[in-house]
Image (spheres, rainbow, N blue to C red):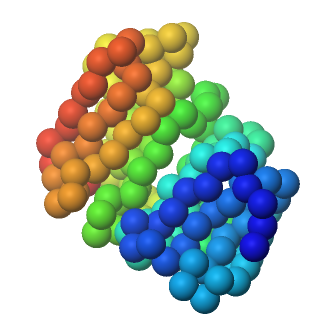
Amino acid sequence: MPRSVYTYVSPNGRYAVAFAGTPTVVDLQEKRIVTKIEGLARSHAVFSEDGRLLMGIDARGEAVVWDSRAGAEKLRFAAEGSTITAYAFSPDGQWIAVADVKGRLRIADARTGRVTRTVQIPGADEEGERAVYHMGFDRRGQRLTLAGVGGRLVTFSNAGR
């Protein structure tokens, strides 16, 4: 098993990604290395509920979704003149949320990457001083809560709709 400085476990408890050198996906049940994720630059990542997808930030500041078992890139969310600061999967795996330093929140279809909703986050600013740094959906995927916006929490209802 790889040594790790940071480790994130999939919600179903099956997989983990270990950060030490090239990020490595480990099958915790079978106690084996599954794949390495080339291009994952920052020491943070999130898994989809079933552990099949892994999302993180690449060296360009873009959000990338990889197949966590094959290591292949599946989707990419361009930073569009900014830097992605937070990202999350909905519990049902249908939606992806991505926020950038300029305060834009995009909700996209997790299968196609098609953005279905773009919102300017209340309280965020163009300079990034009040950017979103963490986010998460509730268990039913109905609400998305963002943290960091100048020390506040902001919640969107019907986030994926």
Note whether 135 is above or below 129 in the view shown: below
Q: Is residue 70 visible?
A: no
Note whether 82 is above or below 49 in the view shown: above
The residue at 19%/46% (across/down) is: 143
Point out residue 88 in the picture as x, y percentages from the top left corner: 42, 51
Point out residue 45 in the picture as x, y percentages from the top left corner: 57, 52
Q: Quadrant of residue 146?
A: top left
Give the number of marks: 0
The residue at 47%/66% (across/down) is: 10
Q: In the depicted view, which residue is nearer to us: 29 or 61?
A: 29
Point out residue 25 in the picture as x, y percentages from the top left corner: 67, 70
Quadrant for the N terminus in the image: bottom right
Point out residue 156 in the picture as x, y percentages from the top left corner: 20, 37
The residue at 36%/28% (across/down) is: 147
Outermost residue to the right: 21
The residue at 30%/63% (across/down) is: 91
Note whether 144 is above or below 11 in the view shown: above
